[in-house]
Image: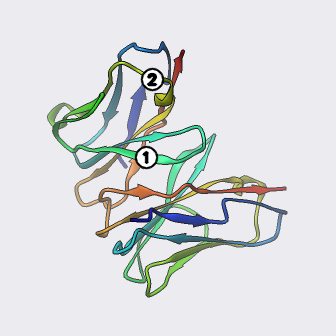
């Protein structure tokens, strides 16, 4: 099946800093989603982005499908951005999402 | 509109017992997927139900089963619990079958003693 690698595994930043999270995948995909898991375990869907670029407030994401990677940008970080960010993908003909191991982001006031 | 509701939120069981978890999807959503999250294995797909039919299944033993009712609510059952079944069980709903845009519930945290 598809392999999903996320980097970095851990990231600690001061409030107000910007960050870039990366997701690499091993095969062509027709579905890619970014999620944020808060400290209480709730997974929030941030983006559905199998290709192209999207922006939502301070967050934006870009997927370059031909090069098999996606980037999540967080600008002007706030403490509420802390948590684990997951990338999940599904390949053509595969209806199951495969999750990466996540990037744990900690924002220090 | 209401989100995905999972019950119970927390539960403690002992080895050998069985457990049933419930998931009510967003109104109008007919697909419900279940995931298991553990520190060691991360997030793993269990199964997906759409219109009361199991559409996909992950690589879990037969002790893990599920069903979906006509109102799209879903239950998953784990029989003969093992210590390794301790996990956060997450349910997600979607308007369509397959790996579509998923909305997750808050999860059910199971501890097996």
Q: Please, which residue is most extreme toward the bottom here?
A: B70
Q: Is residue A62 left or right of residue B78?
A: left
Q: Which mark is residue B29?
A: none
* Of the pair B22 and A96, the residue shown nearer to us: B22
Q: Is residue A97 above or below residue A100?
A: below
Q: Is residue B106 left or right of residue B15?
A: left
Q: Are marks 2 and 1 on the same chain?
A: yes
* Of the pair A2 and B21, the residue shown nearer to us: B21
Q: Is residue B70 above or below residue A6?
A: below
Q: Quadrant of residue B83?
A: bottom right
Which element is circle 1 on?
Answer: strand
In this rendering, which labeled residue sits more in front, label 2 or label 1?
2
Counting the numbered discs, the total is 2
Q: Residue at x 32, y 59 (%)?
A: B99
Q: Please, which residue is most extreme toward the front here?
A: B1
Q: Is residue B70 left or right of residue B10?
A: left
- Sequence-wise first label, 2 or 1: 1
Q: Residue at x 58, y 56 (%)?
A: B107
Q: Is residue B5 above or below residue A86?
A: below
To which residue does mark 1 refer? A44
Q: Which mark is residue A78?
A: 2
Query: How busy is the neighbourhood of tag 1: few (under 14 within 10 Å), some, or many (20 plus)?
Result: some
Please provide percent x and percent y for residue A72.
Answer: 31, 29
Q: Is residue B8 left or right of residue A100?
A: right
**Quadrant assignment for the C terminus of chain B:** bottom right
Q: Quadrant of residue B52?
A: bottom left
Query: Which chain is indicated by disc 2?
Result: A
Please provide percent x and percent y for residue B29.
Answer: 35, 72
Q: Residue at x 31, y 65 (%)?
A: B98
Which element is circle 2 on?
Answer: loop
């Amino acid at each position: 099946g598809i392999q999903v690698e996320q980097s970095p595994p851990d990231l600690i930043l001061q409030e107000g800093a910007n960050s870039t999270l990366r997701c690499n995948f091993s095969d062509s995909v027709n579905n890619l989603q970014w999620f944020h898991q808060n400290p209480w375990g709730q997974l929030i869907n941030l983006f559905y982005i199998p290709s192209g670029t999207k922006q939502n407030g301070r967050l934006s994401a870009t997927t370059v499908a031909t090069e098999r990677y996606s980037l999540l940008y967080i600008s002007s970080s706030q403490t509420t951005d802390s948590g684990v960010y997951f990338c999940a993908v599904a390949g053509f003909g595969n209806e199951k999402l495969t999750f990466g191991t996540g990037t744990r982001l900690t924002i220090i006031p | 509109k209401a989100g995905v509701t999972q019950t119970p939120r927390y539960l403690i069981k002992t080895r050998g017992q069985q457990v049933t978890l419930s998931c009510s999807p967003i109104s109008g959503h007919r697909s419900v997927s279940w995931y298991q999250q553990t520190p060691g294995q991360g997030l793993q797909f269990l199964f997906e139900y759409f219109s009361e039919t199991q559409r996909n299944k992950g690589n879990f033993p037969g002790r893990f089963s599920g069903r979906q009712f006509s109102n799209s609510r879903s239950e998953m059952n784990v029989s003969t619990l093992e210590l390794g079944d301790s996990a956060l069980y997450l349910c997600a709903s979607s308007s369509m079958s397959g790996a579509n845009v998923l909305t997750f519930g808050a999860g059910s945290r199971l501890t097996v003693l």
